Image (cartoon, rainbow, N blue to C red):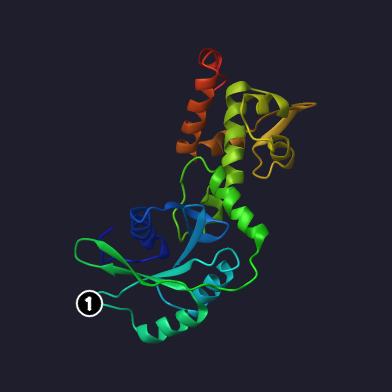
Amino acid sequence: MKPEMIEKETDLFKPVKSYLEHNGYKVHAEVDRCDVVAEREGKLTIVELKKHFSVALLAQAVERQRITDRVYVAVPVPDGRTVPFNYSGMVLLLKRLEIGLLLVHISDTAFKVEAALHPSHYNVLKDRKRQRTVTREIKGRVGEYNTGGSRAADKQITLYRQNTVQVALYLNILGPSSPAALRSAGTCQKTGSILRKNYYGWFIKPARGLYELSKKGREDLNDYPELSSYYRSLFYKRFPEFKTFSME
């Protein structure tokens, strides 16, 4: 993608991510409907990405203030300009709402992100449950496989999907297994619930207390090559003897 091409919100993710990482943040994409969640010294910062400044963007940012005081919106600066259109009004409104602003400048060769406005303290009752959900999600992820700004829920790697992929992969290696056996192999404590609910249709019960991978499960595992590779490596490191006898 050439720097001058900002066709969708996801095009803003890479420069914003680089900016945050340069400033010492660990960056996570698409966490509990937040485009970008950045973490530094135990504190959360949320950034919402949009091609254009809008009421919808403000509504998203205000809602995110229930999670953390540190909320920014990120918008591109049109080619040939130093600030977006209606910049003064935009800044005035963001100051009133106590929301920060990141400007993504476009040059012939690169993107540059500028923190035009930092959020001030926001005195609102925080949604502690939502805050815990976001923190638990990012702490449980084993890698970053999402792109901020994407709303394709069926493609996002949530903590639940991540755990389900691990369960499916281990079943593919071990063959029919009980939830307890899978947990002993290293899957999460919610393995039994994942198997029973079978949200993605990946599992079948060949016998009482046993589960195995369905045809759909085997096919869908191919959609997660990086995550599968990570868990496969983890499994064989712990159980090298299974390399010879694997069901895969």
| Number of numbered markers | 1
Residue that numbered label 1 is attached to: 80
SS label for mark 1:
loop
Seen at 70% across and 41% down, the residue is 198
Residue 63 against residue 109 in the figure, above or below: below
Which of the pair 143/131 is nearer the observer? 131
Look at label 1 and name its amino acid.
Answer: Gly
Residue 36's spot in the image, x, y percent?
Answer: 47, 59
Residue 178 visible in this rendered orientation of the protein: no
Q: Quadrant of residue 84?
A: bottom left
49 horizontally vs 192: left or right: left
Quadrant for the C terminus in the image: top right
Residue occupying the point 54% across, 24% down: 235
In the drawing, does residue 155 fall left or right of residue 214? left
Residue appearing at x 64%, y 35% in the figure? 188
How far across and down, in percent of the image, does residue 65 sit? 56, 69
Residue shown at 66% from the left, 24% from the top: 184
Alpha-carbon neighbours of circle 1 within 10 Å: few (<14), some, or many (≥20)?
few
| 40 to 211, vertically: above or below | below
Residue 100 screen position, x and y as percent: 44, 72
Work out which residue is located at the far right of the displayed protein and give it.
208
118 vs 10: above or below: below
Q: Quadrant of the N terminus?
A: bottom left
| Residue 159 position in % (x across, y down) | 58, 45
Q: Is residue 21 visible?
A: yes
